[in-house]
Image (spheres, rainbow, N blue to C red):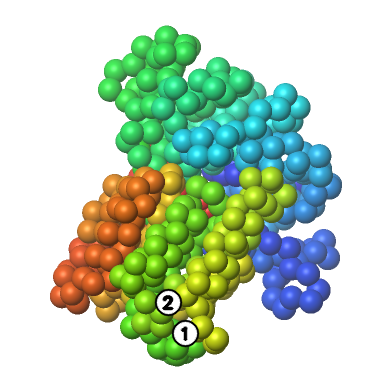
């Protein structure tokens, strides 16, 4: 049994991966199973806070079926929550990723609504809330993460009114007209209003939330504070960031630099390497980006082998139908471009449907002259920030969608509307042809911003604001 903690993080997933017998490393936690901390900005930012405050992280351990016993790893208490195959299908793939995810991303794919998914979402959210109620010490701070767990704040408040509850949404929060389509709308809204502080990536999202509460429940508000059931709920923006130091150290590592040179050589030492790195998700605008590249090649504004594109598309949510359809469309487009513009041994697009280590990603960032981040809608987009952090020499150009949260901060990127193909093409051409002095100037302004706003600051800003709430 884990001791009661004064600080608890609740997220869909625990920040650990089970290490199988054929993978080296990991630590045996006493049960015969071995675990290793998974890479990721959230755990990096929260690790020191969790260790200092004797904290507990609640989440799913990654395999369906009964949950492993609570264990400790690198100074963090981990409390696994069980998810069955059916929970995964209904709560995770269904309600979270086929209903809420597309709806909150401007309906770029039509959301699917199923009653049994909603019920599973409710049941699983209650399970997480009960786990949090069990491990939180009297008056503890509990920080709930993301769209899979929007009902947890109110459920937890009911069980434990003594707690201070924060919630952070990593994805966009839609405008009223879209949110109103959600069959569970009032329940989700009330779920979030169970928190003392609701954090969003952008100010606009916080405003959408405040207006929605007024529209749906008639809650009065002043500034960014909502009056709800005799309590005050604050809604504010906390743009998430990355571990800037980690990315800069990687980019400065001689092995990574060597690898970047090798990657360029393997690509045939082209004049311009254009890179895309995304989860294979329909919100990321991968198809639009490929089409823009194809039209530029077709019009002779770019040509192979002077320019090549590398598109890394990390496998993601492969059992959800939208994602299977997207994979087919992207692979068809890559095939078409290579068929029309490639030569033997010189493809126009190098398409990689694989996961990479942090150092290989850093090497790719170092190797790329132009980074294309063109989501149709994105809460923040960490890839854009990672690219900027990796460009130690201050060169390189970032093409960035206005619909990524990151566009609110990285103003020196080549911004574009990803729905407007001509605008994407123009932004890409401006990035390809920018002179070196101008590219360095833009990159160094963005780097300075990131150095002052890394993920540790994001976590401390949120927790300080939550702590200041009486
Ligand atoms: P995501 O939609 O997953 O995150 P993003 O912010 O770009 O999107 O983060 C992706 C992360 O995965 C990056 O750190 C990137 O380096 C890594 N990654 C991508 N491809 C990889 C590969 N092939 N191998 C290994 N790692 C890879 C959600 C929201 C975002 C928000 C984040 C954080 O959708 O808008 O920025 O949460 O809040």
Q: Which residue lies under the disc numbered 1? A: 267
Image-based side of 195 in relation to 219, left or right: right
Q: Is residue 318 visible to us here?
A: yes
Quarter of image, res 398: bottom left
For the residues labelled 1 and 2, the Cα–Cα distance comes to 8 Å
> What mark, if any, has residue 308 been given in the picture?
2
Image height of 202 relative to 316, above or below: above
Q: Earlier in the sequence, mark 1 or mark 2?
A: 1
Q: Secondary structure at mark 1?
A: loop
- Residue appearing at x 57%, y 34% in the figure: 110
Are the residues flagged by discs 1 and 2 in contact, CB closer than 8 Å? yes
- Residue appearing at x 81%, y 43% in the figure: 84
Q: Is residue 405 visible to us here?
A: no
Considering depth in this image, is 309 or 43 the residue closer to the camera? 309
Image-based side of 430 in relation to 42, left or right: left
Image height of 130 relative to 400, above or below: above
> What mark, if any, has residue 113 been given in the picture?
none
Outermost residue to the top: 218
């Amino acid at each position: 049994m884990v001791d009661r903690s004064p600080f608890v993080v609740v997220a869909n997933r625990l920040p650990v991966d089970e290490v199988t017998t054929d993978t080296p490393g990991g630590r045996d936690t006493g049960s015969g199973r071995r675990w290793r901390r998974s890479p990721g900005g959230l755990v990096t930012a929260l690790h020191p806070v969790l260790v200092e405050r004797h904290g507990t992280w609640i989440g799913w351990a990654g395999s369906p079926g009964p949950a492993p016993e609570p264990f400790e790893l690198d100074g963090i208490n981990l409390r696994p929550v069980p998810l069955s195959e059916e929970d995964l299908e209904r709560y995770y793939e269904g309600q979270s990723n086929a209903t809420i995810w597309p709806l909150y991303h401007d309906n770029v794919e039509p959301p699917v609504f199923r009653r049994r998914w909603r019920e599973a979402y409710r049941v699983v959210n209650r399970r997480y809330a009960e786990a949090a109620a069990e491990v939180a010490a009297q008056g503890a701070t509990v920080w709930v993460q993301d769209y899979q767990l929007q009902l947890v704040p109110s459920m937890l408040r009911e069980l434990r009114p003594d707690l201070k509850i924060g919630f952070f949404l990593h994805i966009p929060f839609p405008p009223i007209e879209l949110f109103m389509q959600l069959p569970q709308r009032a329940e989700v809204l009330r779920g979030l209003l169970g928190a003392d502080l609701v954090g969003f990536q952008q100010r606009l999202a916080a405003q959408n939330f405040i207006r929605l509460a007024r529209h749906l429940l008639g809650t009065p508000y002043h500034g960014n504070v909502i009056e709800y059931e005799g309590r005050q709920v604050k809604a504010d923006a906390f743009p998430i960031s990355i571990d800037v130091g980690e990315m800069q150290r990687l980019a400065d590592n001689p092995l990574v630099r060597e690898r970047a040179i090798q990657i360029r050589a393997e690509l045939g030492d082209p004049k311009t390497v254009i890179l895309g790195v995304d989860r294979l998700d329909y919100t990321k605008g991968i198809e639009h980006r490929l089409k823009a590249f194809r039209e530029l090649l077709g019009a002779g504004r770019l040509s192979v082998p002077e320019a090549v594109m590398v598109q890394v598309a990390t496998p993601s949510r492969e059992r959800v139908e939208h994602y299977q359809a997207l994979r087919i469309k992207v692979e068809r487009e890559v095939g078409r471009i290579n068929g029309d513009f490639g030569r033997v041994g010189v493809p126009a697009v190098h398409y990689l449907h694989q996961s990479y280590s942090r150092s290989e990603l850093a090497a790719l960032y170092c190797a790329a002259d132009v980074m294309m981040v063109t989501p149709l809608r994105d809460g923040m987009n960490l890839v854009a920030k990672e690219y900027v952090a990796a460009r130690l020499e201050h060169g390189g150009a970032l093409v960035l969608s206005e619909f990524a949260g990151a566009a609110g901060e990285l103003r020196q990127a080549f911004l574009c509307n990803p729905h407007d193909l001509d605008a994407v093409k123009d932004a890409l051409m401006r990035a390809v042809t920018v002179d070196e002095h101008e590219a360095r100037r833009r990159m160094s302004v963005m780097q300075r911003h990131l150095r002052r706003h890394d993920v540790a600051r994001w976590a401390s800003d949120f927790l300080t604001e939550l702590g200041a709430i009486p």
